[in-house]
Image: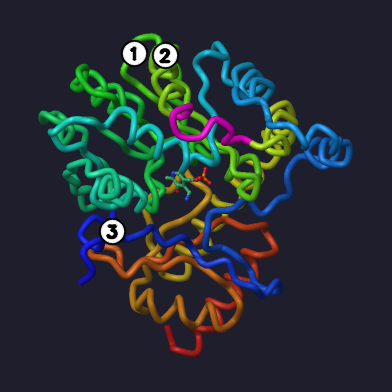
Amino acid sequence: MKNWEANIRKVTPYVPGEQPKRTDVIKLNTNENPYPPSPKVTEALREMPTEPMRKYPDPEARQLVEAIAREEHVHPEQVFVGVGSDDVLAMIFLTFFNSDKPILFPDITYSFYDVWADMLRIPYEQQPLNDAFEIVGSDYYKENGGVVFPNPNAPTGALLGMPTVEDILAHNPDVIVVVDEAYIDFGGTTCTGLLEKYENLIVVKTFSKSRSLAGMRIGYAIASKELIRYLNDVKYSFNSYTMNQTAIRLGTAAAEDHAYFEETRRKIIATREQAKKELAALGFSFADSQANFLFATHKSVPAEELFTALKEQGIYVRYFKKPRIDNYLRITIGTDAQMERLYTFLKEYLRKLNI
Ligand code: PMP
């Protein structure tokens, strides 16, 4: 071993879902939105001047921050933006999780949380979901250095009711509680209404799912002005210019097109509810997802086998070879036509197996 090797920050990185090079696939593996971004985004891109690109972007991304503040009915000083909610969450971990006590999050959850905690040397304890794959509020009553969970949870899709979210907040007045609402627009009610009452709450959201802009990398946090100031101090100590000019412009256009946002999220919700019926009829079971995916297990065919068979047909879903969930597939809700292809293939596959 070389002497310098002992001082390297060695980490096990997060593994994102596959982005196949083939374009003829049905891509239901990374919870992207199957519909294009708002036509207002296309228009803004077409009109985007290139001359200002010789200059640095606005470090405050004020235009985008203000558009989000209007959409969320909060003050612009309560909004922090970043390069996807991954960037926002990483900044939150760095800024607020600095205790010797462990932070708490579910055992089955967004698999980036333990990666950030390991990288930043933050101690953590994972709280097991119950057998119905639900977060148990009382698991978060113990002493801790902070709490983070997605709502709806990922990859289960299960939504925690507002009373339980508030119960967790009420039991954790001395630490920061982060609610990751990446999927909230597909069924739940945002907990931003609790911000006035709980000054230790941070709500994180993204443009990647309900605004069809995963490729632009735009996420944000909403919290008290004080917490947002702390977050910005850390961001400006790290990289002032996280948001590029294109992301600021196009993100603003997306935030301002509320009608399109409503239309596409409603379409996805309707397709998801239909998918629940179709997949249940084929022998699948799943938590009652309120997200843009279903986390499904089949009564007789192992998930890994289905995953491979689907992939061979160019239908990509996500499979996690991990304890408790290695017999589940996470299936992103696509368009109705894409979902029909999925049902047709599954029907035929199960028929051949005499199931
Ligand atoms: N939180 C959860 C629960 C997610 O599933 C994802 C998507 N991978 C993210 C945050 C991050 O999304 P993005 O960085 O695209 O905003």
Q: Is residue 293 above or below residue 152?
A: below
- The residue to which callout 2 is attached is 224
Q: Which residues are magenta?
A: 235-243
Q: How many marks?
A: 3
**Quadrant where the C terminus lies?**
bottom left
Cα–Cα gap, marks 3 and 1: 35 Å
- The residue to which callout 1 is attached is 199
Disc 1 residue type (three-letter): Glu
Disc 3 residue type (three-letter): Lys
Residue 240: quadrant of the picture: top right
Element class at badge 2 = loop
Q: Is 224 inside the magenta-drawn segment?
A: no
Asked whether the beta carbons under mark 2 and mark 1 sit within 8 Å of each other, the answer is yes
Q: Residue 65 at what x, y percent from top left?
A: 61, 22
Camera-side mark, 2 or 3: 3
Q: Earlier in the sequence, mark 3 or mark 1?
A: 3
Cα–Cα gap, marks 2 and 3: 35 Å
Left or right: residue 71 versus residue 136 is right
The crowd level at tag 1 (other Cα within 10 Å; few <14, some 14-19, many 20+) is some
Query: In the rendering, which numbered label is found on residue 10?
Result: 3
- The prevailing secondary structure element of the residues shown in magenta is loop
Asked whether the beta carbons under mark 2 and mark 3 sit within 8 Å of each other, the answer is no
Q: Nearer the viewer, residue 313 or 355?
A: 313
Q: Is 237 inside the magenta-drawn segment?
A: yes
Q: Earlier in the sequence, mark 2 or mark 3?
A: 3
Element class at badge 3 = loop
Cα–Cα gap, marks 2 and 1: 6 Å
> Which residue of the protein is positioned furthest toward the front in this rendering?
3
